[in-house]
Image (tube, rainbow, N blue to C red):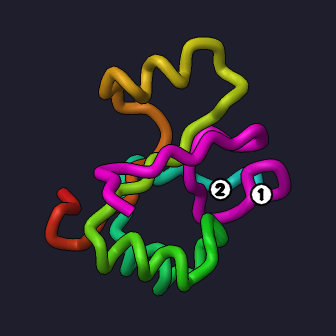
Amino acid sequence: MEADVILMAKNNVDGVYNADPQVDSNAYKYDQLSYLDLLNEGLGVMDSTASSLCMDNDIALIVFSILDKGNIKRVLTGENIGTIIRRKDNHE
């Protein structure tokens, strides 16, 4: 697959959290993560095979809410919404 980024629109969260925000009021959202962080912390965004494939092929993943009006346009125009996950050497 020749892609620069994969968009993951969710209907129950607006990004990646360290815990389920619907269950844990202390859960916090990550603005950025590396794929290694995602795998090491066991965050349930996608299965480990898919995470490894994205990391190995240097494909970023943006996780965002589909429920907020205009979010697809916002993410496509490069607005910083949700959580971006990328290879460690691209992670700031």
Q: Residues within 10 Å of mark 2 (few under 14, many from 20)?
A: some
Q: Identify the element where label 2 is drawn.
A: loop
Q: Are marks 2 and 1 in contact (CB under 8 Å)?
A: yes
Q: Is residue 9 magenta?
A: yes
Which residue appears at 56% of the width and 54% of the height? 16
Which residue appears at 29% of the width and 72% of the height? 57
Q: Which quadrant is home to the C terminus?
A: bottom left
Which residue appears at 39% of the width and 73% of the height? 35
Q: Amino acid at mark 2?
A: Ala
Q: Position of residue 3 (x, y in %)?
A: 34, 53
Q: Residues within 10 Å of mark 1 (few under 14, many from 20)?
A: few
Magenta range is 1-23
Say which of 58 and 90 sits in front: 58
Q: Residue furthest top?
A: 69
Q: Residue furthest front?
A: 1
Q: Position of residue 59 (x, y in %)?
A: 33, 61
Which residue appears at 72% of the width and 25% of the height? 67
Q: Is residue 80 left or right of residue 18?
A: left
State which quadrant residue 46 falls in: bottom right
Can you identify the residue that label 1 sits on?
24
Q: Is residue 85 left or right of residue 71?
A: left
Magenta stretch: dominant secondary structure: loop
Q: Establish if 66 lies above or below 22.
A: above
State which quadrant residue 74 falls in: top left
Q: Amino acid at mark 1?
A: Asp
Label annotation for residue 27:
2
Q: Identify the element where label 1 is drawn.
A: loop
Question: Marks 2 and 1, Cα distance to the nearest angstrom?
Answer: 5 Å
Q: Is residue 18 magenta?
A: yes
Q: Position of residue 80 (x, y in %)?
A: 35, 31
Q: Position of residue 90 (x, y in %)?
A: 17, 62
Q: Establish if 76 lies above or below 53.
A: above
